[in-house]
Amino acid sequence: MVLARFLPRDEKFFDYFREAATNATEVATLLYEVLDQPQDAERKIRRMRDLEHRGDEITHQVYNALNRTFVTPLDREDIRDLASKIDDFTDDMEEIGRRVRLYKIAEPTKPAVLLAKIIREQAGIIAQAVSRLENAKEAQVLVHETVEVNRLEDEGDDVLNQALGSLYEGATDIPALVKAIHWGEIYNLLEDTTDRGEDIANTIEAIVMKNA
């Protein structure tokens, strides 16, 4: 084991995780603003796209660091998995922004705003949890935070079910039907994104349990 002291070791993985989670939180905040107040949505959606590209760059930095590092602070597969899941979370949010622009969404709906709020809350908790990963003494707090992210995902399921249950009420002509179909896609994408948040939380919990 003495040899390991002289082998390449990169402790920047935690920095990359924090940067990726912070980036995702900014995207989540913009997504909420786009759906809550569609005014100036075009500029916010462009910013979401830029941040999604930044998320890709961070993920590539993690992969490159893994390729050049012999000794890692966590299992290599866990590092790759967490980086990938944060990237997926960010990608999904950016995709929702693209759909809002594509469908020329101009008026917010209560379910969309509620789901976006849940995603924003998940992102904030994930960012807090990621910042604790480096400290083994934070294990209990980390587990509590992952449970909260999972609870929010359950809340998202409830919002989606209610939204889909009344989606076609009042859709009595073709334009109204098309609008309902578009909102149905967006609602499902929003709920899928809460699932991505839960995936991150589950990955973090697994890392904590493995390294406790």
Image (spheres, rainbow, N blue to C red):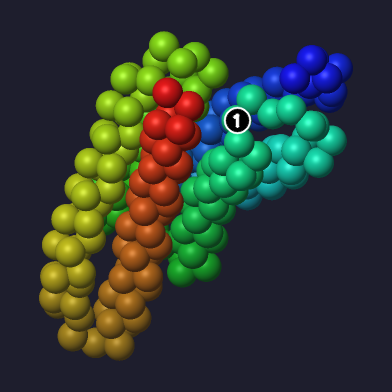
Is 56 placed above or below 26 here? Answer: below
Q: Position of residue 3 (x, y in %)?
A: 83, 19
Disc 1 is placed on an element classified as: loop
Can the viewer see residue 167?
yes
**Image position of 6 (left or right of 111):** right
Q: Position of residue 129 (x, y in %)?
A: 43, 26
The image quarter in which residue 122 lies: top left
Picture quarter with the N terminus: top right
Q: Which amino acid does label 1 sit on?
A: Leu
Residue plotted at (46% across, 16% down): 136
**Image position of 3 (left or right of 16):** right
**Image position of 57 (left or right of 182):** right
Residue plotted at (54% across, 18% down): 134
**Image position of 67 (left or right of 112):** right
Residue plotted at (61% across, 36% down): 75
Residue closest to the eye, 4 or 91 = 4
Q: Position of residue 209 (x, y in %)?
A: 40, 31
Is 116 placed above or below 58 here? Answer: below
Residue closest to the eye, 74 or 171 = 74
The residue to which callout 1 is attached is: 74
Picture quarter with the C terminus: top left
Mark 1 is surrounded, within 10 Å at the Cα level, by few (under 14), some (14 to 19) or many (20 or more) other residues, namely some
Residue plotted at (18% across, 85% down): 172
**Residue most extreme to the top:** 137
Can the viewer see residue 26?
no
